[in-house]
Image (tube, helix red, strand yellow):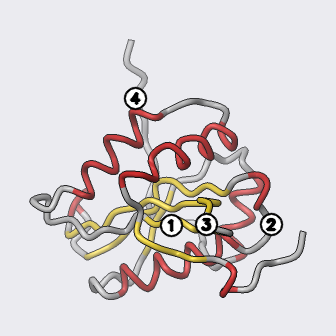
């Protein structure tokens, strides 16, 4: 499919009414239903008392949610003494993939977090997800100097 022109894609802040379409895109892309996760996340960043910068965005094409990006800004958390942002979820409806939507979402995300003083964005990608790894590599992401550790709980 051809890339959509920027004027054909509206990027806006995610709102409560986006939970259902975002959860549906997530299901189409990842194969697992997680509406409770999205309800909780949207409630967190819409909470005016949280003090969080809203970095979760949706892309609309023809008035329909076609993609989303969710992330956070951290002010010294995880023992990292700098302001940084993370992307924890990005998804584009399979009917709209490879049309530039993820790139438009990422550009708006970067603009938003830069205003908060962020100069580094981190994300985690499954090593086997070559499509997502390729996307992030194409937009300038490189391996970080951190190591993701895990502990299996029995």
The image shows residue 113 at horizontal and vertical percentages of 36, 79
The image shows residue 145 at horizontal and vertical percentages of 47, 66
Q: Secondary structure at mark 4?
A: loop
Residue at label 3?
Answer: 63
Residue furthest front in the image: 63
N-term mark: 2 or 1: 2
The image shows residue 22 at horizontal and vertical percentages of 53, 49
Label 1 neighbour load within 10 Å: few <14, some 14-19, many 20+: few
Residue at label 2?
Answer: 98
Residue at label 4?
Answer: 151
The image shows residue 76 at horizontal and vertical percentages of 20, 67
N-term mark: 2 or 3: 3
Q: At 76% from the left edge and 53% from the top edge, which residue is drawn?
A: 130
Q: CA distance from mark 1 to mark 3?
A: 37 Å
**Is residue 39 depicted above or below 77 in this figure?**
above
Q: Secondary structure at mark 3?
A: loop
Residue furthest top in the image: 154
Q: At 40% from the left edge and 29% from the top edge, which residue is drawn?
A: 151
Label 4 neighbour load within 10 Å: few <14, some 14-19, many 20+: few
> Could you say which disc has been placed on residue 80 in the image?
none
Query: For the residues carrying marks 1 and 3, which lies nearer the camera in this image?
Result: 3
Residue at label 1?
Answer: 144
Q: Residue 90 occupies which quadrant of the picture?
A: bottom right
């Amino acid at each position: 499919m051809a890339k959509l022109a920027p004027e054909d894609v509206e990027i806006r802040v995610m709102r409560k009414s986006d939970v259902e379409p975002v959860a549906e895109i997530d299901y189409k892309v990842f194969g697992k239903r997680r509406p409770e996760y999205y309800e909780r996340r949207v409630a967190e960043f819409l909470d005016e008392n949280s003090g969080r910068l809203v970095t979760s965005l949706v892309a609309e094409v023809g008035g329909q949610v076609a993609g989303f990006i969710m992330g956070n800004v951290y002010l010294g958390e995880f023992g990292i003494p700098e302001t940084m942002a993370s992307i924890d979820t990005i998804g584009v409806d399979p009917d709209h993939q490879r049309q530039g939507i993820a790139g438009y979402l990422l550009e708006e995300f970067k603009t938003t977090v830069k205003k908060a003083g962020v100069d580094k964005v981190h994300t985690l990608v499954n090593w086997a997800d070559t499509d997502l790894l390729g996307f992030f590599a194409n937009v300038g992401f490189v391996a970080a100097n951190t190591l993701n550790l895990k502990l299996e709980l029995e």
